[in-house]
Amino acid sequence: MAAIASPGHCQVSVAKSFGSGADQGSVGLSADAGDDAELEGPQAIYAGDSGEIYLLDQLNGRVLKFDPARPEDKPQSLELPEGVAPTDLIVSDGDIHVWDGKVVTLQATGREDAPVRGLSITRSAEPPDEAITSTFAQMGSTDLADAPDPTSGAPRSLQSTDRNKQVIASHGRGPVVASFSALGGDSGVRIEVAPRKAAESLGRLELQVRDRLGAVELLDIDRQGRFFVFAENIPAVGSDAPNVFVARFSPTGRIEGVYELPLTQNVGLSRRFVAISPDGDVYFLRNRKGASDVLGVGFRQISKGKIIDLGGGGSAGFDLTDVPKLKAAHAGVRPLSREQVIQTGMEFANVRWRVNPSSYGNDPDTSCSGFNRIRRPGYLHGKVNQQVVGVPYCWGCHGSLASFASSIGRGKLAGNVCTRNDPRPDVAGVDCSAFVSAAWGLSTHFTTIAIPAITRQLPSGWDMLPGDALNKPGSHVMLFVRFTPDKKAEVLESSTGGCNGKVCRNVYPLGSLLARGYAPVRYRGLMADTSAATDASKLDAMTPQGKTKGR
């Protein structure tokens, strides 16, 4: 099949833009900072049944609802309940479902046309519908609590559901099931779509890219019966740009064209950054310095049967030759195996400790500069004298797990999500690069800008092994754990956004990280590949790359 070359992104328009603040027309955005502070803003968007857009403004503790056809109107504010700190949301049948380590279902209270309404947790004893949990899993919001320990040699599946199958509550056809199978090796996929409770087929979709497919998810079916599929093309050579796009198929399954998502190095990390309206409009969430935009993404037609080749329109990632190098950098304590790196990282994520009054601090504590929240990480709110899981995020803090425990015992505060202020000496925890430095066994804290001095950039994201990292100099770094069965990247990270202010395990579409400027790197102090190969049987469970069938 002939490839089509279409350089550049699809045209985009601003549906609505928000400045930084806490009033009704603004959103919470993190203040500018130095090393190791990813720009943080709204984490998710979703389109409701009437075409309205829901925006998760988690820093201000609310969901904003607005009509993209009336951008001049102020949004309605839906206030989150106390103790709910989500990182993702979806809307279905009038309910707002948010992800806070699990599905929490909310219903709006108060007058429907009021500028501010409350959200209350529904008390249903029924477990969340499979369509809800599957839709959350599209962008990596998935329950890792029951997943096998990456160092245990247990089966690789991240969740009990079959990730060659997906269930969604579509706008146009109700609940449907999508089944995925390989088509032409790693570059193509066939998707069979059927009603959830019927045997007939709604469509057979075939998609093929130039290089290698990353994540592939059925996002929605609109009222016209058109199918919308999220997909990533990830080149084998890291210097080539990944492409992240939504492909649109006709009701008969014929590919009509694509919406290329404008992911670039200056777009902040967010969980659910694309939404499909009931009428088939595609919206993209862009967090940038000083503002958060909801963009309408333009459509680009392609011919039937063509390989999707969007050229070099995406971000090629960071060129590490432009990052200042540290001369004579001394980092390693001793050579580490990949198992040891992942084991150390898991200990930071899984440690259980009690929040004493000294570590909790005054309530409220000193406010962060530039947005409406306090010093304390979100997962600690209301947890005084209770047990919690995970080392807290602390900007500018570093050290081992033992030093964290010692600091808490000596009465230091736990965590600090403020990033504009100077590092506080009275607080304990780790920021993103301090966590990765500790997992690599370093005696020195290497920031994201310094990490290139002790690592080598891998040719491709597909070359990553457990214990490698995804580094964005000057911003954020994640410790790579493994590829999930549906070709996403499972990571360990210390994050204020995706982890709600602590070290945790997370899952992200790989191409979407690469397009944002994250570079796959390997710490030079890890055991040589020949040494690591002797542990291949142990590492196999941690490294499904190259072995995943189907998706």
Image (cartoon, rainbow, N blue to C red):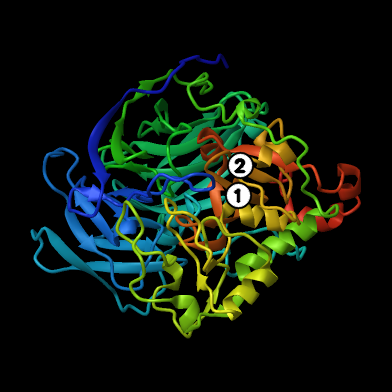
Q: In the image, residue 420 lies at what x, y percent?
A: 42, 50
**Marks 1 and 2: CB-CB under 8 Å?**
yes
Q: Which residue is mark 2?
A: 471
For this rendering, which residue is in front, 283 or 531? Answer: 531
Q: Quadrant of residue 438?
A: bottom right
Q: In the image, residue 505 lies at what x, y percent?
A: 58, 59
Position above or below: 323 against 425: above
Q: Which residue is mark 1?
A: 478
Q: Quadrant of residue 549?
A: top right
What residue do we see at 12% from left, 39% from top? 72
For this rendering, which residue is in front, 259 or 302? Answer: 259
What residue do we see at 29% from left, 50% from top? 55
Q: Secondary structure at mark 2?
A: strand
Q: In the image, residue 396 lies at what x, y percent?
A: 55, 55
Disc 2 marks which amino acid? Asn
- Quadrant containing the N terminus is top right
- Quadrant containing the C terminus is top right
For this rendering, which residue is in front, 537 or 291? Answer: 291
Position above or below: 350 against 511: below
Upstream in the sequence, badge 1 or badge 2? 2
Q: Secondary structure at mark 1?
A: strand
